[in-house]
Image: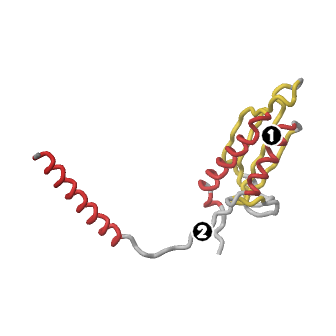
Amino acid sequence: MKFGKIVASLCMGFSLLAVQHTACAAESIPNTPQKISQRLSPVMVEFEGADSLGSRLATRLKELFNASNLFQLEGSDVPKFRIVISSVPEFESRPNIGSAYSVVWLFSLSDATLRHYLSVHVGVVSGDDVNDLAAKLVEKTDTIAMKYAYLFPEKK
């Protein structure tokens, strides 16, 4: 019986403490809402290669960027992330089985300036895995865009 009273008093004490903590936390948080800045990273996808799987990967990547709220496909001469995809058939005698590919993320301030290396991804893809790989590349591009967002001039 004593144990039950102890547990009950502890529970009441913790609930009172929680209420006091919540009241203090609510008072210390400033009530100054700020507009959330929309992040729309400009990207350009470039493809180098002659195999169909690499071409499908580049096309699927462009489709995903075009449908995303986070990216804008950009062809004009503005600061942007350039994603260069290079691919070759995994086996020359069986070109549609798989492709070896590399994806390089670059930052370009303009078309006339030197591109800056940001990251790379290398692998082998089959026809069944193109959509999954494209989704992973979009996710990695988003991570890179957040990491290097400071490279873009501030919009006024």
Q: Position of residue 95 (x, y in %)?
A: 87, 29
Q: Position of residue 43 (x, y in %)?
A: 74, 56
Residue 68 occupies quadrant? bottom right
According to the picture, the residue beneath numbered tag 1 turns out to be: 86
Disc number lying in front (1 or 2): 2
Amino acid type shown at disc 1: Ser
The residue at 10%/47% (across/down) is: 2
Given residues 64 and 151, the one toward you in this image is 64
The residue at 65%/47% (across/down) is: 140
Amino acid type shown at disc 2: Ser
Q: Earlier in the sequence, mark 1 or mark 2?
A: 2
Residue 28 occupies quadrant? bottom left
Left or right for 75, reference 27: right
Q: Secondary structure at mark 2?
A: loop
The residue at 86%/39% (across/down) is: 49
Q: CA distance from mark 1 to mark 2?
A: 34 Å
Q: How is the image coloured?
A: secondary structure
Q: Which mark is residue 37?
A: 2
The residue at 22%/54% (across/down) is: 11
Q: Total number of numbered labels?
A: 2
Q: Is residue 138 above or below residue 30?
A: above
Q: Secondary structure at mark 1?
A: strand
Q: Which mark is residue 128?
A: none
Q: Quadrant of the C terminus?
A: bottom right
Q: Position of residue 17 (x, y in %)?
A: 24, 61
Q: Dot 1, crowdedness within 10 Å: few (<14), some or many (≥20)?
A: many
Q: Is residue 146 above or below residue 137?
A: below
Query: CB atoms at circles 1 and 2 under 8 Å apart?
Result: no
